[in-house]
Amino acid sequence: MKKGIIKKITTYAACAALLVPTTVGLTACGNMDMMDMHYTFHYVVIEENGEHVLHKVNKWADSESESVTISTQCCDNYIWTSSNRAVLYENKPEAAAYDRACSHESE
């Protein structure tokens, strides 16, 4: 009887040891956080109608394709764009990196 209980406990512990890292590795929290890699970006320059516009970032996520989704703080907008048209920055980029800053206020 005791061997059966020990075997069940060992089996559950082994499953948990495999399941927890997999779950953590496949989910992202905060700005963009995966396991030991933590990417925090506060600014994005997006090409919009031939202009490079600076936005403040709330959250962002990339995908397996060449797309990125960005939730902006400055205009409370949700932008889905190509990663070829957006550059994320941890610190505010120099003024030469963009044509204008987002001037919309969130309502």
Image (cartoon, rainbow, N blue to C red):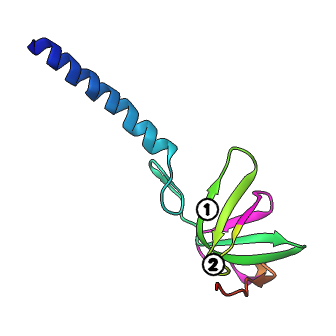
Nearer-the-camera pick, 5 or 33:
5
The location of residue 96, given as percent across then percent down, is 77, 80
Report crowding for label 2: few under 14, some 14 to 19, many 20 or more residues within 10 A (C-alpha).
some
5 displayed left or right of 95: left
Residue 63 percent coordinates (x, y):
67, 48
Amino acid at circle 2? Lys
Quarter of the image holding residue 20?
top left
Front in this rendered view, residue 85 or 1? 1
The structure residue drawn at horizontal position 44% and vertical position 40%, both measured from the top left corner, is 23
The answer to which quarter of the image holds residue 101 is: bottom right
Residue 7 image label: none
Q: Which residue is mark 1?
A: 60
**Segment tinted magenta in the rendering:** 79-95
Q: Residues within 10 Å of mark 1 (few under 14, many from 20)?
A: many
Determine the image quadrant of residue 64: top right
Q: Is residue 96 visible?
A: yes
Give the residue at mark 2: 92
Query: What is the distance, in whole Å, between disc 1 and disc 2 at their CAs?
Result: 16 Å
Instruction: Identify the image quadrant of the C terminus.
Output: bottom right
Question: Would residue 97 be visible to someone looking at this image?
Answer: no
For residue 13, side relative to residue 87 (left or right): left
Residue 87 counted in the magenta span:
yes
Classify the position of the N terminus by image quarter: top left
